[in-house]
Amino acid sequence: MGNALRFSRRSVLKTMTAAGGLGALGAGLPWTPAMAKTLVIGFLYVGPRDDYGYNQAHAEGAAAVKAMPGVKVLEEEKVPETVDVENSMESMINLDGASLLFPTSFGYFDPYVLKEAKKHPDLTFLHCGGLWTPGKHPTNVGSYFGYIDEAEYLSGIVAAYASKSKKLGFIAAKPIPQVLRNINSFTLGARSVDPTITTAVVFTGDWSMPVKEAEAANSLIDQGADVLTCHVDSPKVIVETAEKRGVFATGYHASQATLAPKGYLTGAEWNWAKVYTDFVKMVQGGITPPNLVRGGLKEGIIKTSPYGAAVSDAARRHADAVKAKFMDGSFVIYKGPIKDNKGNSVVAEGKSHGQTDIALESMNWLVEGVTGSIS
Amino acid sequence: MPPFMHRAVTHLSASVSALAVPAAAVAVSLALFGAFVALVGVDPVEMYQLMYRGAFGTWFSWQNTLTRASPLILTALCTALPAQLGLVIIGGEGALVLGALAAAATGVALNGAPVALVWPAMALAGMAGGALLIGGAGALRQWRGVNETISSLLLTYIAIAVLNHMVEGPLKDPASLNKPSTAPLADTYMIGTLPGSSVHWGLVVGIVCAVAAWVLMRRTTFGFAARMVGGNPRAARMAGLPVGRLLVVTTALAGAAAGLAGMVEVAAVHGRASASLVAGYGSTGILVAFLARQNPLAVIPVAVLFGGIGASGGLLQRRLDLPDASVLVLQGIIFVVLLASEAMQGRLRLFAFATPAAKEA
Amino acid sequence: MDHASLGWWGVPLAVLAGAIRVSTPFLFVSLGECLTEKSGRINLGLEGTLVMGAMSGYATAYLTGNPWAGVLVAGLAGSLLGVLHAAICALERVNDIAVGIALMLLGTGLAFFLGKPFIQPQAPQLPAIPFGWWSGSAQVRSALDINPLFLVGLALAPLLLWGLRTTRWGMVLRIVGESAEAARAMGYPINRVRLLATAAGGFFAGVGGSFLSLSYPGSWNERLSSGQGITAVALVIFARWDPVLCVWASLLFGGAGALGPALQSVGVTQGYHLFNAAPYVLTLAIMIATSSSRHRLAGAPAELSVTR
């Protein structure tokens, strides 16, 4: 198998920004019987894999891989972002013969994944985070990520229709660009429906703090917010608190619909099952997976939860129309003029940043309409 | 028997007993844990075979084990040193974190200076950070009568908050977008691995510190005085020993050990300070110290044992579908059984003939 | 005032509501620990007991459909850990602080191990009593949706104080805690008294844990406790081993924990990590202010190792 991989490594495109192409490539491959030898694949999660959130989304992807023929899946959960990452991967490689690894936490990349990849140039490491830089990072490393803020924009639209108080609440872990982008897209989506809407943000400080998250949810509801959403590792407590207090919620990472049958509107979900099965098909077929994969709704990396019962027809029509534009690639979220919440212009009139624009990756502002600031 | 032989036999018997009791405790714990996993439907024999393979079965497993053991040696010293004075310190995690933060800030500030200057400076900064925290707990105990166990734990929570605040605020590298951290250490300042292995030099640092701590506590006047305070504080005070100074210096040294572990984590593993530094080495270190019966030398093999348990945890998850918490349960059982076995210490009649001889002597 | 939004008025309301919501686990653990410490022993393992209580309570409520059965099982699991603590401490030369740390680890480990299948399911929650029916404001109504366990805790505190001061068993407990020698001379079974006190303490801590999983935040997962169990042990020292003062101390802590999110929801987001550390800083500051190197704290049981 090593030979087949080495042969193909030089031949296929090194970088692709659209996983749509990736899917087509993977699906179009003939199943080569020569590759029937079992492919051992290792998944590493940073938290518990049944957290209704980040790790569960990845574990669902792994479960889809498990159902494929000719693979053996190894899973390790709660692997901290330390030398343990190297050790766990090394152990999977040495003791279990893994040749394809999915280290799924953002913080695993530098230095752990890079070190292991240099050490094992004939194995493939596919990391979730979208961090690969040509020339700087080893070629047997791939990194993938999705523009989940597209789904957040749609959630914002739906939230705007559901809100009576015109106040939305966002509970976030840390003020990092990925999180800020979700907050801003959600708010822009809502304000595209009604420009008087505001979003209040609470940062809890860490990725999993259930008591703090519940406290933040209650505080936001007390301040009049009637739709909550979040960017933390496990949205379970927040969605449940919203349901208990009788307000709406939109989900994140995975579907939390079953947790809030009355108030769950929609949600931004990862579609790792598609991404992972595509990757595995490529490796099985002897094709080197691209080093950088990014995409959104159009490429199938992101999906939205089915609309809940409380979503009005008008909201569905509006959100579906925008979603159709995302699907044909004609919609741009960050289109000037956009001001931040201190009144400075951040995207000038006539300028626009498409999803792939690198400028969006270092976002450090909150859009007009968000209450709160980045310390 | 001639008297010198009596003494030799007595000494031997004492040390065999000192080893035999913890060893028996570990054996009992393994049996208990085996029974526990059998209850959830896992074959204990298969499990222990896997654990052995994952921890010590191959050269790779040994490297995995030793890499995990190296921070544990230093964080265990953070508990073992104050224990000589009868104090229970559980703030190793906080000292590690603060030491790491100080070391990373120093390494970044001195960027461009020669390695021979940067490493000692980082080590000193790390040790100072840890010493400040645990020495602080010692000082509070001495001058305000605040219980050191609880204060060291509270200080740990505060240290973690300070780490988060600094790496997301004043010390944040603007380029560390989605994983807030300090600026990375230049490659030349990274501590490498031992030749022919993937184990970094931190292991050697840990062993040297453990030996030094043993010499300090067992072979110097300082150590003698410290242990006297631990044995009987009132008598020590009456004998005119500077109890306060001993207490603060020892706790500061303990914190320095954990702070050094933080420096090694930054310079050999992470390359920067970030929230990922909070990885539980401090809490496992407490366990290592107790299992080593607070003996700085014994800390080394016990840390290796716990490194091995940690190294085998992944295999248990992958092959047997046991939850990651299995390692916690096993550690908890070992700790509990070991403490219960304290009562057996010295009562074991392994060398029945030696005991009367000891009385005679 | 705007009916839907409270603006800055929301901060004191959130702190008050938070104090009630967040304080209950603190209250139960500190009451339990108070009882244990009065017998002359400290149980640092209550953090593990709390987590174990949260898990076993949630699992039981899910499996039986009855949240009160969950509370009971959580308490029983807690007393089991308490009995283990007491039994080991009864052996010679065993340090109670070390046993506590060991049980903290074991309790947490067991809860995580056994609790895996219960992270996903939703268990029935404890009902709340709507004390805010009179108010027109939804926020006030929600703040006054009070869990009966909180009220039980409130009632328990003066009851314990009365019991310790005036009943026979309260006196025996205090004698054992003040001087084991005197108790032995009077023929009281020291170890049995301490065993009962630790088991009762464990029961309370287990119930406190079930509040976390069955009421607020009302879900079981591995990050549920952020050190509430151990902070509550420190609270007892701050409350001078007085059950009624434990109530005030717990409320203070609950409020301190609610301050950060409340301030952020009105737009104050700077330095939130430092706000989040407020409860720990507060505990430490109070311990420094109220301890003394010269004399034992008022109310401290003389046999207690932490105060010597």
Image (spheres, grey):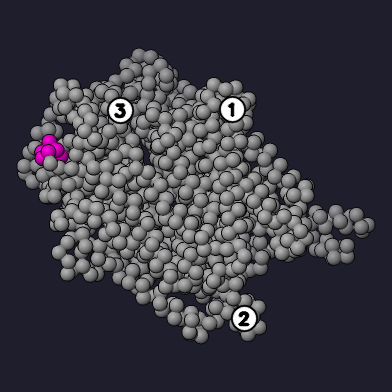
The answer to whether dots 2 and 3 both sit on one chain is no
Instruction: Say which residue appears at 46% left-offset and 22% top-offset.
Output: A121
The chain under label 2 reads: C
CA–CA distance between discs 1 and 2?
A: 61 Å
Query: Could one spot residue B193 in this view of the protein?
Result: no
- The magenta stretch spans residue A193: yes
The chain under label 3 reads: A
Number of residue marks: 3
CA–CA distance between discs 1 and 3?
A: 33 Å
The label number, if any, that marks residue A361 in the structure image: 3
In percent of width and height, residue C98 lies at: 58, 59
Is disc 2 surrounded by few (<14), some (14 to 19) or many (20+) residues within 10 Å?
some
Q: Please, what is the three-letter code of the amino acid marked with disc 2? A: Ala
Is B80 above or below relative to C71?
above
Is disc 1 surrounded by few (<14), some (14 to 19) or many (20+) residues within 10 Å?
many
Q: Nearer the viewer, residue B112 or A113?
A: B112
The chain under label 1 reads: B
In percent of width and height, residue C142 lies at: 22, 62
In the picture of the structure, the residue carrying the numbered disc 2 is C183
Horizontal side, residue A68 vs residue C111: left or right? left
- The magenta stretch spans residue C128: no
In the picture of the structure, the residue carrying the numbered disc 1 is B118
Q: Quadrant of residue A159?
A: top left
Magenta range: A190-195
Disc 3 is placed on an element classified as: helix
Residue that protrudes farthest toward the right in the picture? B2
Instruction: Say which residue appears at 51% left-offset and 28% top-offset.
Output: B109
The answer to whether dots 1 and 3 both sit on one chain is no
CA–CA distance between discs 2 and 3?
A: 70 Å
Disc 2 is placed on an element classified as: helix
